[in-house]
Amino acid sequence: MGAVVQGAVGFGLGLVAAPVIAMLEPSAMPGAIQVVNVTLPLFTILGEWRGVDWRGLGFAVLGRVPGSLLGGLVVVYVSTRMLGVLVGVMVLLAVALTAWAAAVPRNRATITGAGFVSGITGTATGIGGPPMALVYSGAKGPQIRATLAVFFLLSAAQSLVVLAALDRLPARSLVFGATLLPFLVAGFLASGPLRRYLDGGRIRTGILCVAALSALTLILHGNLG
């Protein structure tokens, strides 16, 4: 289901999969979700690589590097539940502002900032898509999905390296994540009809809905554990 959502909107795999994995096998997080996060973007890139916003991607990665390092420290020293609640509230506010305004300004400052926040939350909780998706919510579907796919590929790879360096990437996390890959492929293949439907002028609404659900998931998980 997470692959269906991300295959259509451009993000959302962590929204669906991370809370389920956290409930079934808490010790496998956040490494397991990063295994699927580093795999799914490859399929999107193969089909829509022409839509990548390379300039914006550079600024996003520039913010993501320090963000992921901070996210790694959060995993070690700070409660990820507290972080989830805080980020969830921020994302809900951003969704409300985005829905009210014409579009989030997309410039070097907002893209770098989104990359930074995504680095923190993506590394610590496995849900790092909403900040970047909100910044690109005014773009066309193929550009959103392709740009986010390259960003998520680099981000997940970086998160895996950071977690390994901090000794927070046990072998069971990698194995658990690998067992999900066949279902990830099936979900992506099933996302085609939804992707074509959203590209008919509905992609922005889809992004706002998925971002709001991501925020609520973070808040509920933080409060209910």
Image (tube, helix red, strand yellow):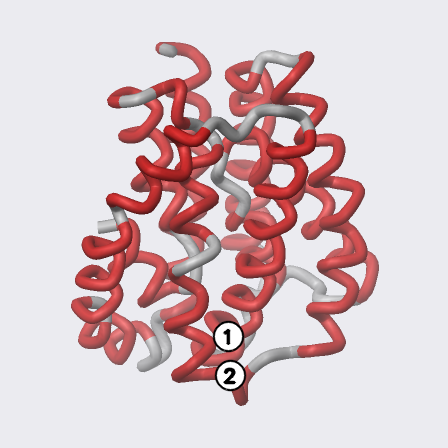
Q: Residue at x 32, y 46 (%)?
A: 178
Q: Which residue is drawn at 55% across and 39% down?
A: 91
Locate residue 202 relative to residue 138 in the image: left or right: left
The quarter of the picture where residue 51 lies is bottom right
How packed mark 2 is, by other alpha carbons closer than 10 Å (few <14, some 14-19, many 20 or more), is: some
Q: Is residue 23 visible?
A: yes
> Mark 1 or mark 2, which is nearer the start of the sequence?
2
**Amino acid type of disc 2?**
Trp
Q: Is mark 1 on a helix, strand or loop?
A: helix
Residue 162: give x, y in percent of width and height: 67, 37
The quarter of the picture where residue 20 lies is top left
Q: Nearer the viewer, residue 17 or 85?
A: 17
Residue 196: give x, y in percent of width and height: 26, 80
Q: Which of 39 and 210 is in front in this view?
A: 39
**Amino acid type of disc 1?**
Ala
On the image, numbered disc 1 is attached to which residue?
A: 146
Q: What element carries label 2?
A: helix
Residue 18: give x, y in percent of width and height: 37, 34
Residue 48: give x, y in percent of width and height: 44, 83
On the image, numbered disc 2 is attached to which residue?
A: 49
Locate residue 122 relative to residue 35 in the image: left or right: right
Locate residue 196 relative to residue 105 in the image: left or right: left
Q: Which residue is drawn at 31% across and 39% down?
A: 17
Image height of 166 relative to 137, above or below: above
Per the model, the C-alpha gap separating discs 2 and 1 is: 6 Å
Q: Can residue 213 be seen in this view?
A: no
Task: Give the mark count.
Answer: 2
Q: Do the residues labelled 2 and 1 touch (CB within 8 Å)?
A: yes
Q: Which mark is residue 165?
A: none
